[in-house]
Image (cartoon, rainbow, N blue to C red):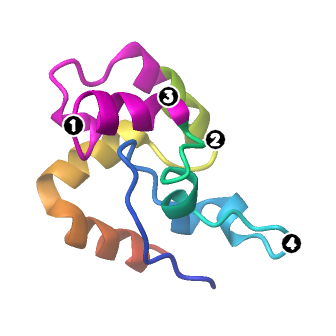
């Protein structure tokens, strides 16, 4: 299985478990490429550029309606982004990545 060692986006998606990242033909290169090239304009710009946060949980209005709507689409891919945000806050980036890497 392909391992993701990259950037954790402000929304808290773990790209290493995303079907688009794992596919063989035309795989997604993960948030490290997408976010940094500003393809995810809504969450990334709001969190990083406008508010200066690393993650959405740092915002005083978390979870805002924009985040909730975005997070809803990821539930069908097996990720609850609100839980991911809470775990990022509790565990820190390094331990959060390790937790995801160790999930089967």
Please state the horizontal and vertical placement of residue 60, each as a whole percent of the image: 15, 22
Q: Quadrant of residue 85?
A: top left
> Who's the residue at 16% across and 49% down the image?
89
Circles 1 and 4, Cβ within 8 Å, touching? The answer is no
- In the depicted structure, whether residue 47 falls above or below residue 99: above
SS class, disc 3: helix
Q: Nearer the viewer, mark 3 or mark 2?
A: 3
Q: Which residue is mark 1?
A: 52
Circles 2 and 4, Cβ within 8 Å, touching? The answer is no
Task: Answer few, some or many: residues within 10 Å of disc 1's Cα (few below 14, many 20 plus, some between 14 and 19).
Answer: few
Residue at the farthest bottom position:
1
Question: Whole-Å distance between the Cαs marked 3 and 2?
Answer: 20 Å
Task: Answer few, some or many: residues within 10 Å of disc 3's Cα (few below 14, many 20 plus, some between 14 and 19).
Answer: few
SS class, disc 2: loop
Task: Choose the circle earlier in sequence order: 3 or 4.
Answer: 4
Q: Which residue is mark 2?
A: 76
Question: Whole-Å distance between the Cαs marked 3 and 1?
Answer: 14 Å
Label ID, residue 42: 3
Q: Quadrant of residue 102?
A: bottom left
Task: Choose the circle earlier in sequence order: 3 or 1.
Answer: 3
Task: Choose the circle earlier in sequence order: 1 or 4.
Answer: 4
Q: Nearer the viewer, residue 27 or 51?
A: 51
Please state the horizontal and vertical placement of residue 12, each as a whole percent of the image: 38, 48
- In the depicted structure, whether residue 14 falls above or below residue 77: below
The question of residue 87 being in magenta is answered with no
Q: Which residue is mark 4?
A: 25
Task: Choose the circle earlier in sequence order: 2 or 4.
Answer: 4
Task: Choose the circle earlier in sequence order: 1 or 2.
Answer: 1
Horizontally, is 19 left or right of 44 in the view?
right
Task: Choose the circle earlier in sequence order: 3 or 2.
Answer: 3
């Amino acid at each position: 299985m392909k391992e993701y060692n990259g950037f954790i986006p402000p929304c808290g998606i773990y790209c290493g478990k995303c079907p688009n990242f794992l596919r063989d033909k035309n795989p997604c290169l993960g948030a490290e490429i997408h976010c940094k090239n500003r393809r995810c304009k809504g969450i990334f710009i709001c969190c990083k550029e406008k508010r200066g946060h690393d993650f959405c949980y740092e915002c005083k209005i978390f979870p805002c309606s924009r985040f909730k709507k975005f997070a809803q689409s990821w539930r069908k891919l097996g990720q609850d982004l609100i839980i991911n945000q809470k775990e990022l806050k509790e565990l820190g980036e390094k331990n959060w990545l390790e937790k995801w890497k160790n999930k089967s």
